[in-house]
Amino acid sequence: MDSQPTFQVFVISLERALERREYMKSLVARLGFNATIISAVDGKNLRPEQRARYSSARAQRVYGCEMSDNEIACYLSHLSIYSKMLEHRIDVALVLEDDISAVGDLKPIVDDLLKLPKSSWQVVRLQSSKKSVSHPTEGDRSGEPVARIGEREIFRLRTGVLGGCAYMIRLGAASAMLARSEQIDMPIDQTLDRYWENGIVPYVLRPLPVWHEDLFESEIGERGRALAAALAKKNVRRRRAQRLVDSLNKRIIRHMFFTKFHL
């Protein structure tokens, strides 16, 4: 068993989102966490050097459309946490966005996750936007159980999780995400899912202890894909070609990952 890692809780929230900040301060205090509030990058005020991280051409090829300014800002906000982890050598971080609710016993759940060996997980999602992940009906979506946390279980998945509202990330995975993010081309949660590129195997804790809560008006707004759906479709051939490449890479890396786990 590994020694207890250094750990910190981060809450991402816009400075101008006063209601959200107060809500999250109250929530994390009620849950028993000491949290650091991270001032989110504001999509309405992206600086030139921040916008320069975004690759429009790659987004259209890989993501399938342009990213919105708020999606870029959200991505950069998460990256700032990964940078802090490297700078201060934080072994594990719990990352929370400011539009969530959680079960009352989230802290003991997190404490138990911290006690597991490093090899148990790299990034474990505590929330997912995909019903096929939160309530799977197909075997491939269910995943492979890895460890039991009270009444919950960690599952290693062969599919993307989709969801960045709440997750735990280890230092090595944070470093891998920073390396992968020299160019930004899709939302942070989808980048986390691309295990064939970043080497981060998807894990989820079920039943999910955290969920998205629509208590306030969204600061992110429509996702790039939702906005693009109303526009004429472009670059269809390039997108299809990219999907074929992704599919091939996923099969190769998936075989390597899951063969390794069964050795």
Image: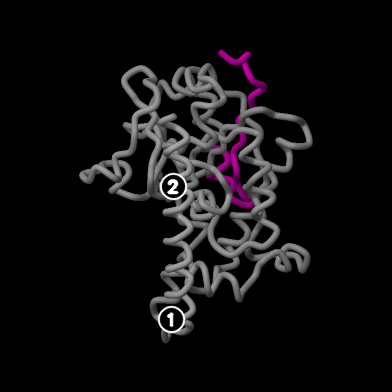
Q: Nearer the viewer, residue 23 or 48?
A: 48
Q: Nearer the viewer, residue 234 or 29?
A: 234
Q: What range of the chain is rendered magenta? A: 1-22
Q: Residues within 10 Å of mark 1 (few under 14, many from 20)?
A: few
| Quadrant housing the N terminus | top right
Say what amino acid the circle numbered 2 marks: Arg
Q: What residue is at 29 percent from the left and 45 percent from the top?
A: 140
Residue 9 picture location, percent across and down: 60, 30
Residue 153 picture location, percent across and down: 35, 26
Q: Is 95 one of the magenta-colored residues?
A: no
Q: Is 10 one of the magenta-colored residues?
A: yes
Q: Nearer the viewer, residue 26 or 87?
A: 87
When the figure is inspected, residue 41 is found, relative to residue 245, above or below; the finding is: above
Q: What residue is at 45 percent from the left and 50 percent from the top?
A: 216
Which residue corresponds to mark 1?
A: 236
Q: Residues within 10 Å of mark 2 (few under 14, many from 20)?
A: some
When the figure is inspected, residue 102 is found, relative to residue 256, above or below; the finding is: above
When the figure is inspected, residue 34 is found, relative to residue 160, above or below; the finding is: above
Say what amino acid the circle numbered 1 marks: Val
| Quadrant housing the C terminus | top left
Measured Cα–Cα span from mark 1 to mark 2: 26 Å
- Say what secondary structure mark 1 lies in: helix
Which residue corresponds to mark 2?
A: 254
Residue 171 picture location, percent across and down: 66, 34
Determine which of the numbered discs, if any, sits on residue 43 in the image: none
